[in-house]
Amino acid sequence: MGITRRQFLGRSGAAAGGFLGASLFGSPFAARALAESLGDRYLVVLFLDGGNDGLNTIIPAENGSIGSFRTHYEAARVSGGGGLRVAANQLLTPSTVSMIDPGTGGQLGFHPGLQGLRNLYEQGHVAVVQNCGYPNANLSHEESRRIWEYADPRRTGVTSGWIGRHLAANFGPAEIPGVAVRGSVPGEFAQTATSILTISSVSSARFPFDSSYGSDSPFRRNALMALAEAALASGQPTLGQVGAAGRSTLLASQSYPPLDDLYEDERPSFDAMYDGLGTSTAHDLREIAKVIYGVESGVENIEARYFELQSGGYDTHSDQGLPQPGNRHYDLHRQIGDAIETFYADCTDMGVADKVCLVVWSEFSRRILQNDSGTDHGTQGPMFVVGAVNGGVYGNHPDIDGDALDDGNTRYSQETGNPHRSTDIRDVYGTILKHWVNVPHQTILSSILPRDAGDPADFWTQENFDIGFL
């Protein structure tokens, strides 16, 4: 069967998304981009889809020296039937390291479901970044998710993600620097200059040939490669970009599936550990681990350094549950914490734990006051940065005093000296870009994360790309 140019374009985009960019395809300088940016490191982004309840994630254990930290929590989260309160003696408070809120001096603790994260925190591998948000918070899932992914609180209409803008400046369509374990390119990676591979698993990362005529696949593959090579040689920029992306997609469809057998054959104990967890997050982190192992093993055409996955279920308007197994929020937290702990152990055994930075975020937190048995959409909440980090607590816990709330939600503030000052999401991103990805400070400001205008107490007019977690 023949294949038309239209079919080629459609099929080459089915396995790798986000190509067609400025130039760089076939450039001898493209291979240097990795060494000049992320280097021999990996960045993993984990999205908690639905709006994670931050107040029941990092929880006040006692009143601090400023305000009535724990008292306000207990007033907002009731006990008894439908109650969401986590008792102070149920919290996972690290025993060997400090977990004190910098703003109030109060002791903090992890939700009981986050045993895996607590364990890593005690080992110094988790940074808790509190009170993360942006000005004029939007409580729509779709809008707030887009703001976080694109780092665009001003809603300027940018069409690229905060990582995507970096990728577009450093990679071309002949490369696949990023892999997302999902069905579409995530907003963080969105751009039009380089390819992002989207997969459900490495074993299924095959080019979508017609399965009804499997014996024809080698001929189809050769025909597609010939089209790609011809497009590359055409001298026309757009055709060249399509050819470069098509060629890299075809090569990926050959190179990625064998990573499954490589990992299962050489890392059976860790393969079994992920299986033992039996969760989607464990599955997806294992797929990322397989790619990392492929890079470390020198498998040809495996060069991805940027990864994304998501875990859903956090829209807990009702039946959020008590901090016990079988309850919704507990089970969600247990899934995340255990999967991350296993992934870190896997990376440690591979010898790459000091090369991995994993960032956890959710599109918003939940309202401070609970409803009957859950929580409504909120504003600011914690992020986690896991791996090769300076572990500890960064940023201030949000002000949960009922008199300080704005329609039940915490207020964004950049006011100097405020013990509940917000951590703008762009400061977290900027710190990662500057200190992990090695993007120059001024480049971040000029082309990735431009400052706000307005009242400096209410808007992000002064950046802090030197948060100490990296």
Image (tube, rainbow, N blue to C red):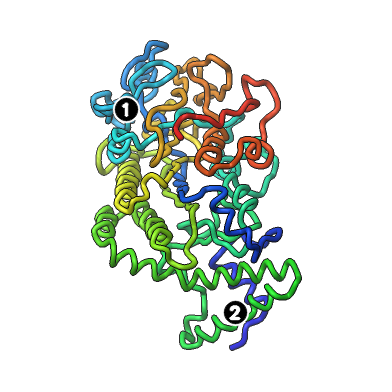
Q: Position of residue 168 (x, y in %)?
A: 63, 53
Q: Residues within 10 Å of mark 2 (few under 14, many from 20)?
A: many
Q: Residue at x 75, y 72 (%)?
A: 235
Q: Amino acid at mark 2?
A: Leu
Front residue of 292/3: it is 292
Tag 1 residue: 109
Q: Write down the quadrant of residue 256 in the picture.
A: bottom left
Report whether 260 appears left or right of 80: right
The amino acid beneath tag 1 is Gly
Q: Is residue 287 visible?
A: no
Residue 319 pos. (x, y %): 35, 39
Residue drawn at x 58%, y 55% as measured from the top left: 32
The residues bearing labels 1 and 2 have C-alpha atoms spaced at a distance of: 55 Å
Specify whether residue 388 is in view.
yes
State which tag comes first along the sequence, 1 or 2. Answer: 1
Q: Which residue is mark 2?
A: 224
The image quadrant of residue 13 is bottom right
The residue sitting at 49% across, 86% down in the picture is 213
Question: Circles 1 and 2: CB distance less than 8 Å?
Answer: no
Quadrant the N terminus occupies: bottom right
Q: Secondary structure at mark 2?
A: helix
| Residue 25 - label | none
Helix, strand or loop at label 1? It is strand
Q: Is residue 262 above or below residue 68?
A: below
Q: Nearer the viewer, residue 356 or 406?
A: 356
Q: Position of residue 118 (x, y in %)?
A: 30, 35
Return the residue nearer the eye: 106 or 233. Answer: 233
